Amino acid sequence: MALKNLNNQTLTWLKRGVFLLALVPLGNLAVAGFTDGLGANPIEKITRSTGYWTLTLLMITLAITPLRRLAGWQWPVRLRRMLGLFAFFYGCLHFSMYLVVDQFFDWEGIAKDIIKRPYITVGFPSFVLMLPLAITSSDGMIRRLGGKRWRQLHRSAYICAIGGVVHYWWLVKKDLTNPITFAALLSVLLGLRLFYAAKDALKRHGKADTGAASH
Amino acid sequence: MPVYKPTPIPASEITPRPLFNDRRRFMQIAAGASLAALLPPSVWAADNKLAGVKNPAYTVPEELTPYKDVTSYNNFYEFGTGKDDPAKNAGGLKTRPWTVTVEGEVKKPQVFDLDTLMKMAAIEERIYRLRCVEAWSMVVPWLGFSLAELIKQVQPTGKAKFVEFISLNDASQMPGQQTSVLAWPYREGLRIDEAMHPLTLLTFGLYGELLPNQNGAPVRVVVPWKYGFKSAKSIVGIRFTEQQPVTSWMLAGPSEYGFYSNVNPTVDHARWSQAKERRIGEFFRRKTLMFNGYEQEVAALYTGMDLKANF
């Protein structure tokens, strides 16, 4: 099937397209900023929007492996690094809003928030955990770490995503529609991973069994 | 190479300045008229004006939050939970005819027609701070009179310890009520002495006009020393009770929203700090004032009370 494997040229164009697409939320904010479209509380709007897109891009990134297993598509894996880095990029913007505008480098206030405010207690480390993932995203780092260790490290993306959803859930005043949607999506994505991991384990086990030819 | 020469425009072809300007004016009027035609009558009719005499005793000397922000950034879950939902979805609210049923522990229970209610006392303009429980704030010029004026007329009995406010419950006019995000109708309440306090404003307008629908039309209360959600909007019922009413927000989150909900920088919300607030239009947060800056006026209401326990 043509969709399963794309040639290099198509992939290059696709990458460019996805790159531009991932910048649309930022572009929207910029346009709104210049046209008085951010509403009465622009700081809240920007913080909410960048947070939303951090989570959305994390979800898309985490959908790539299940997609490969379900549909047999290979090429999305080649977009994963870029998507993950965009999640980190929006996460940085989101965190900067908190650090600069909300707290204005009030480290004591930030420390208090991390201890006292559960949604920050879980949100802050989820963001910090994205740092080593972004740093080790280059080909050179993958080589240096070795595929196995690199994969283990990058499994912490699950923790970032779980932390991000909990962070959202805990900060919403009453209307949980969005956090519930993210939680459901993440459950499906992580559930599929567990399912495939169990299936693979069974298969290996089965092979070992037939090898011994016992039953 | 031939040089391009513009054909000279004969003087007779030049539009005289007054005509040219008039054309622009004509376009503006036409644009205005076609826009106005799209809006509900209440927006352009002159009858949405509401005059009030400025009450200098209740005028905070702070910069007003622009009309546009006051009327486009609202928490009014009856029209949706987004800040811009009320302005978008409140167009279908029918504010006339409107009655307010006053009942319960009063000697003279009565159903007031809105127009009668508005004529009960002289309308004042009061500039109050508004502090939302979400840690943002505004400064709004409200129009109305002390709720005490109404309370005196209906004569509460000795058993009237609390006042409950009931907002409109009609999902056909209030699309947000199609979801059960809060227990409908929206209910709020005050202790009788809080309700009788002259600061507690029975409110019909803002910025020199009748309340826009998204701001709680046609009648609401404004209790400036409490978090915004205590100030019930689109009120259809006022009930005097002996027992403390259970409010919609108390039902929604008993550990987060107490009956009193006084603005207090030293008592945090269960999940976020109340020490600072973002004044709409300002960049950095400012410190939140005790009782939202109305400490002098209202602190005596709470003498001897543990404000942490009675949040």
Image (cartoon, coloured by chain):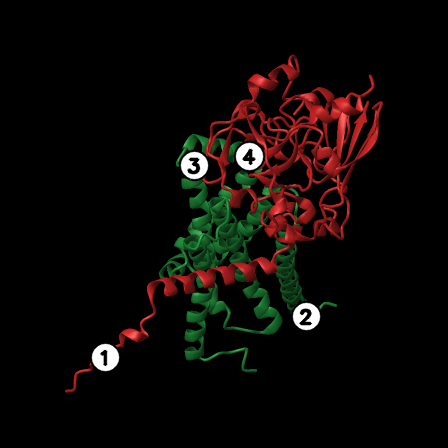
Chain colours: A green, B red
Other residues around mark 3 within 10 Å, as few (<14) / some (14–19) / many (≥20): some
The dot on residue B6 is 1
Q: Is residue B305 left or right of residue A156?
A: right
Distance in Å between CA atoms under marks 3 and 4: 23 Å
**Label 2 sits on residue:** A210
Distance in Å between CA atoms under marks 3 and 2: 68 Å
Q: Quadrant of the N terminus of chain B?
A: bottom left
Mark 4 or 1: the one toward you:
1
| 4 and 1 marks on the same chain | yes
Distance in Å between CA atoms under marks 1 and 3: 57 Å
Chain containing the residue with disc 1: B
Mark 1 or 3: the one toward you:
1
x and y percentages locating residue A120 in the rendered image: 53, 39
Q: Is residue B271 above or below residue B82?
A: above
Other residues around mark 1 within 10 Å, as few (<14) / some (14–19) / many (≥20): few
Along the line of sight, the residue nearer the viewer: B199 or B99: B99
Q: Quadrant of the C terminus of chain B?
A: top right
**Label 4 sits on residue:** B141
Q: Earlier in the sequence, mark 4 or mark 1?
A: 1
| 3 and 4 marks on the same chain | yes
Q: Secondary structure at mark 4?
A: strand
Which amino acid, mark 2? Answer: Thr
Along the line of sight, the residue nearer the viewer: A129 or A100: A100
Q: Give the residue displayed 82% in from the left and 22% down from the top.
A: B242
